[in-house]
Amino acid sequence: MNKLVAIGEALIDFTALEKGDLLSVRSFEKNAGGAPANVAVCAARLGGRAALVSKLGQDAFGDYLISVLSENHVDVSNILRTDRANTALAFVALDEKGERSFSFYRNPSADMLLSADEIPPHLLQKGDILHFCSVDLVDAPVREAHRRIIEYAVDADAIISFDPNLRPDLWPSREEMLSAVREFLPCCHILKVSEEELAEISGKTSEKDALSELLCGKAAAVVVSRGSRGASIFLRDGKEFSVPGEKAEQVDSTGAGDVFIGTFLYQILAQGLTAETLADSAGLLYRFLAYANHAAALSVTKRGAIPSMPYYKDVFLDFVK
């Protein structure tokens, strides 16, 4: 099986143990997090090969992240360490419905210092998947690291996946965030967005117009997650498929989107699809969407991102459609 290579932040989520906002809660639980790291762990838990490219601080939190990723069989050989900044932290509050609010400590954090010349040139090959998000597209050395690894992915004919996972609080302005996201859109074969992100990134109020705007460049598919209402996939040739939501008792939605896209990408690897065959695999992609939706529904029934991630048996053997 080919491998998934995720690039970007790995951080510590301190998730509130009681419901309420960050002003009122008093105790927190420590878990490994960061969207790219979560996606790598999800693919590995399902049985795939996965690696993370990142940078951590020379601190106990960095040690903890290396330990958790290794325990989950993620290749950590391309995670660097630095004493110039600390490992990023995120404090997460949950409301009565399990929805989240965040407060980040990363100004700068170690991941932001990953530079282009630290990216290995032969990490990716044909059929591998490069996955990235938008948090580390900020104006820092790590943005250039993303540009470099994308160049290598294009040269290797790898599949490129982008989940913007918008976090406006981490940017000087919303306009700067959207500008960075739009710059990287044309290079990706797979774009995963929520309904809200679809409108915000495209600047269109009509879903049809938004999809027309985003199915550009190399894009073969736009995957739209709709929370409890399921998900849809839109292909460049005009085909589209949707799956309904699944009933689940939501405890914590942290990492659900990462589980969704991680499960989707794992199946692409398991089936041996390439950048060229993606667009002609509508039937497979519909099936992938159903399993990804199921995996995300399972994940929200437990606390934390990585602790809540299902294994292969949970997703593929126990799922009756």
Image (cartoon, rainbow, N blue to C red):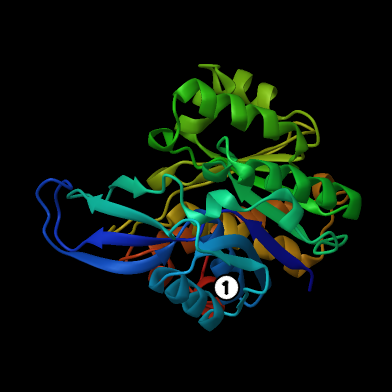
Position of residue 118 measured from the top left corner of the image (x, y, whole percent): 72, 58
| Residue found at the far front of this picture | 84
Residue depicted at x 78% and y 66%:
271
Q: Residues within 10 Å of mark 1 (few under 14, many from 20)?
A: some
Which residue appears at 76% of the width and 53% of the height?
Answer: 117
33 left or right of 142 in image: left
Residue type at mark 1?
Phe
- Place of residue 190 in the rendered image (x, y in percent of width and height, measured from the top left): 70, 44
When the figure is inspected, residue 138 is found, relative to residue 244, above or below; the finding is: above
Residue drawn at (62%, 53%) of the image: 114
Q: Position of residue 38 (x, y in %)?
A: 51, 62
Element under label 1?
Answer: helix
Position in image of residue 207 (x %, y %): 56, 23
Question: Can the viewer see residue 219 in this picture?
Answer: no
Judged left or right of residue 89, residue 290 is: right
Q: Quadrant of residue 53?
A: bottom right
Position of 275 relative to 78 (above/below): above
Q: From the viewer's perspective, tell me whether residue 62 is left or right of residue 4.
A: left
Which is nearer the eye, 66 or 213?
A: 66
Front in this rendered view, residue 271 or 53:
53
Hey, which residue is sitting farthest bottom in the picture? Answer: 71
Question: Which residue has dot 1 on it?
Answer: 316
* Horizontal relation, residue 285 to residue 155: left or right: left
- Residue occupying the point 60% across, 32% down: 181
Residue 147 seen in render: yes
Please state which of residues 169 and 182 is positioned toward the viewer in this rendering: 169
Camera-side residue: 7 or 246? 7
Q: Which image quarter holds the N terminus? A: bottom right
